[in-house]
Amino acid sequence: MSKSKNVQVNISIPKEWKDELENIARIYSVEEGKKVTFLELMRRGIQEKYQLGDPDEKR
């Protein structure tokens, strides 16, 4: 059994941000042909903004 190297972080964001991110996620879901959540958009944004490596990539 493999263990996840992810950690859970709880944050508060304004409801308006969440609502907008959910709307954007719906658009991305249609464009990409797969379910995209607002949390995935947040992860992608953080990864891109701070140029973080892909955690699934082998090093």
Image (cartoon, rainbow, N blue to C red):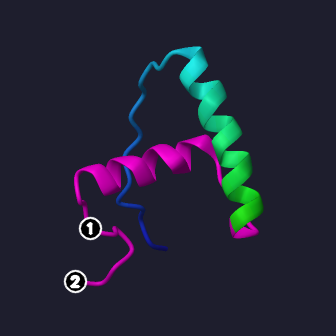
Q: Give the range drawn in magenta.
A: 32-59
Quadrant in which the C terminus is drawn: bottom left
Give the x, y percent position of residue 12. 45, 19
In percent of width and height, residue 31 lies at 71, 64
x 23%, y 59%: residue = 51
**Mark 1 belongs to which amino acid?**
Gly
Residue at position x 72%, y 51% in the image: 27
Residue density around tag 2, few if under 14, some if 14–19, many if 20 or more, within 10 Å: few
Would residue 24 be counted in the magenta stretch?
no
Taking the magenta stretch, the answer to whether it contains residue 48 is yes
The answer to whether residue 52 is seen in the rendering is yes
Q: Report the residue at 41% width, 40% height from top.
A: 8
Residue 17 place in picture, x, y as percent = 54, 24
Q: Name the residue under label 1.
A: 53
Viewer-proximal residue, 13 or 20? 20
Q: Mark 2 points at which residue?
A: 59
Q: Can residue 35 be seen in this view?
A: no
Residue contact at pointers 1 and 2, CB within 8 angstroms: yes
Q: Where residue 21 appears, x then y in whole percent?
A: 60, 36
Mark 1 nearby-residue class (10 Å; few <14, some 14–19, many ≥20): few
Would residue 19 appear left or right of 42 to someone viewing this image? right
**Disc 1/disc 2 C-alpha distance (Å):** 10 Å
Give residue 5's quadrant in the image: bottom left
On the rendered structure, is 11 left or right of 27? left
In terms of secondary structure, where does tag 2 sit? loop
